[in-house]
Amino acid sequence: MSDALLSVRDLVVEFPTRKGILTAVDRVSFDIARGEVLGVVGESGAGKSMTGSAIIGLIEPPGHIAGGTISIAGQRIDNLPYEAMRRVRGKRIGMVFQDPLTSLNPIYTIAEQLIETIRTHMDLNERQARDRAIGLLDQVGIPAASRRIDDYPHQFSGGMRQRVVIALALCVEPELIIADEPTTALDVSVQSQIIDVLKRMCADHGTAIMLITHDMGVIAEAADRVVVMYAGRVAEIGAVRDVIKDAKHPYTKGLMGSIPTLMQDSDRLTQIPGTMPRLTDIPPGCAFSKRCPEAFDRCFVEQPDCRPYQGRDVACLLYDEGKPQ
Amino acid sequence: MTMDSERLKPPGLWARVFDSDIWYSFTRSKVIMAAAIVTFLIFLGALFAPLIAPHDPFDMASLYLMDSLTPPMWEAGGNPVYPLGTDDQGRDILSAILYGSRISLAVGFASVAFAAILGISLGLLAGYMGGRVDSIIMRIADVQLTFPSILIALLIDGSVRSVFGGIDREQSAFYVLVFSIGLSFWVQYARTVRSSTLVEKDKEYVQAARLIGLHPLRIMASHVLPNVMGPVLVIATINLALAIITEATLSFLGVGIPSTQPSLGTLIRIGNDFLFSGEWWIAAFPGAALAILVLAVNLLGDWLRDALNPRLR
Amino acid sequence: MTDVLVGIENLSRDFDVSKPWLNRVLENEEKKYVTAVNDVSFEIRRGETFALVGESGSGKSTIAKLIVGLIRPTGGQILFDGTNVATRGSASMRQLRSRFQMIFQDPFASLNPRWRVKDIIAEPLRTFGVVEGRAAWEKRVDELLETVGLSAKDGAKYPHEFSGGQRQRVAIARALSAQPEFIVCDEPTSALDVSVQAQILNLMRDLQDEFGLTYLFISHDLSVVRHMASRIGVLYLGRLVEVAEGKTLFREPKHPYTKMLLDAVPDLEMTGRSRQPVEGEIPNPIDPPSGCTYHPRCPLANDRCKREVPVLKLHENSKAACFALEEGRG
């Protein structure tokens, strides 16, 4: 898609270990359009955070991008030198992490942190930057913003801090925000507030969001499309409504069945037998084959590619032409 | 429904040792391997001193006063029977070093063990019980830290001697020394163990143990202790070097091991008197032996600390 | 044998969060206390799963620890099978302790990393003398491992060799080993992935059926609680604001806070329902609002709510503590 904002193609992230090469992200491809909210969902070890880190260029060595491309508006960013990447990060891509306590520097006031970021990427003087910062804090719903801007991070509650982090991420009008588990550390009532803030701010500023989370509920509320990841690979990509109500990949089906909901009144939750394989221990063929109720002989040998099927992308041999019926 | 029952038998102990990260980092450094070999050799030498030493330097009857002050064998006037020369009483320096290392190492290990046991127990108690007990123990520790260890050792040495005036100095020297050196070192163990205990005490596995009504001492010993022992090994290794030096210093000052059964420090003291009259070997070789031993143990301790530090791995 | 296994009456617990003595003297400050649990009363009937739901600062974890005796109450009492837990001497306390157990939230911290799994599971067994002799307890540990879905061979391993879900199974096996009647489950699946959570929840229900267990299930996740519990208590800042049967709570929530909590749960059914925007955040427990502590966030608050503290009263099938309900406004 040539007008996609972010384009990830066949991304591979590897970690050399004493016991061999560990593939944390295995040929992952997806696009994010301008202004859309893409959810990336998966359980722990699925590789979703690693994908986010790869896009921002913050993978800890000895891990590295071993293949594939990442582009913003057609321009490659995965092969940029450190300085150039640093400019992209912050200006074009903003970040919101899980723990607002560690995302904000505790020894500086909110004003100092916001103004520093604004003035690094924009040509404004101190007064103008401060006004802009106050405006942003207002938008994210911090009451009495012009007074509270001079407070320190520890003087805010968890939810308020996360709003500040969102303001910080948006202050230089990035084109994309990568939010890694932004609501996980928050109470349920605050979670819904933060999701609302995130959605509203990004709609107002036209920013796209890559929302990484393990919580399907957050995806249902916030995302337009979703990428489901399993063991470092993509299982399914599609519109949120489609994937949730009518999942195609057996893993996604199992996942949706195992989530308890307020409406459901059944006795047992669907459970997928076994556990996600460790990244050092992925079986040949399809990573999900050993746990899949619909696996057949090819599944244990061939790794399925992510192919289009009825309006979405699925990596499953069941939807491959030429499968035995 | 069983999961993961296809796992193989867990690997044996030796397989795990040689496969571990620690062994890996050990074999990567030539210096460390050299230090380990040296230490090992010295240990062996000290252990088997009676078997391998050419002479018994403590047996008064076997000393020939006529052979006293013989230079090392490669010098003029040297004698291959005494490879490194003899001291003023006719004792073979090489044998004296071997036996002396034995005593130095024995004092070193014993005092470290004493300090460790005392420090770990007090640290566990302070960390787990908290409150008054913690405050008292830590204040005592703070006070003690303001004194240099030599001073404490001297103090205790002197006090013991005056209190138990009649004791045979030679017999008691070893125990007094171990006690005083150990007493000056326990604080480090106590502090580390205390801070680890503070962390572990709030963890759910300790709560699970309290839940079934186990006695606090039992919980400390069987649950908390295994989890706070990690840094202790590193401290102990580094302490060993320090303990040996401290013993040498005390012996040098004349308040340590007496000269009838000299440790390396005592030997250096003896040799010191002859240094400027030309018989340099009496001080030099024990001094060199001490330096090598301490260096090797120190290097090992450093390596161990880095190898066991999870953040550096 | 009465129907009520655990009775909580006017339970309260304060924590001293004052600054150290010297600071207080120099800064001329009073001692400060946080009331984590404030006059809470409820019952748990034999064989049921009673859930306590709340967000941070609600006091649910504190209540869990109070019930099993890890901390002492500052007020009120806890009755286990009619006996006041606090007044028991240590001998009879030991007998009592064998009848309840706890499963903790963090599967990584709840097992001693230096102990083998079989020793961890056997510890309650051996402490309470349920079986005699090594062969007997080893056999029982093997059985327990199989019951929770692991294999007997796993007994020789250490906790770090297992995944989060498997460790939680070990924790469950440990909780079962002394054959308790009552298990307090403090957020047992919050740290687990969703598909693993499903396995553990199913396991817990099967075990409850098989062994006739009574659960106190503590969670912040309403969907999980819906699935597991027969009766539910909702906590806010240390007070119980509503108690009801599961179905009733979700179909006809009475207290404004309960309604807000339900509204905040994400819409996984994709019904596209509109959500009432959530007001405010949980206040600081050191300095709670006056009267009904929910009043700053409540759309139905009036003057009385700011002055007086409501108590639990029966409204149709649920108990709720709300003046708006009493006055017919809610």
Image (cartoon, coloured by chain):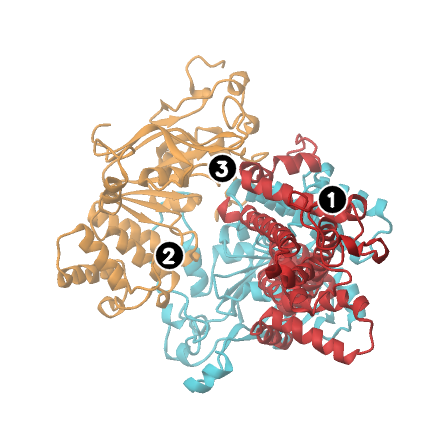
Chain colours: A orange, B red, C cyan
The residue positioned 33% from the left and 31% from the top of the image is A30
Between B172 and B207, which is closer to the camera in this rendering? B172
Q: Secondary structure at mark 2?
A: helix
Identified by mark 3, the residue type is Leu
Could you say where residue A229 lies in the image, as x and y percent from the top left?
43, 34
Identified by mark 1, the residue type is Leu
Q: CA distance from mark 3 to mark 2?
A: 28 Å
Numbered disc in front, either 2 or 1: 2
- The reply, left or right, for residue A119 in relation to residue B47 is left
Q: Quick check: can you spot residue C317?
A: no
Chain on which label 3 sits: A
Vertical relation: A190 (above or below) A43: below
Chain on which label 1 sits: C
Q: Quick check: can you spot residue B265?
A: yes
Report the disc number at residue A255.
3
Between C168 and B216, which is closer to the camera in this rendering? B216
Q: Secondary structure at mark 1?
A: helix
Vertical relation: C171 (above or below) C284: above
Q: Are marks 2 and 1 in contact (CB under 8 Å)?
A: no
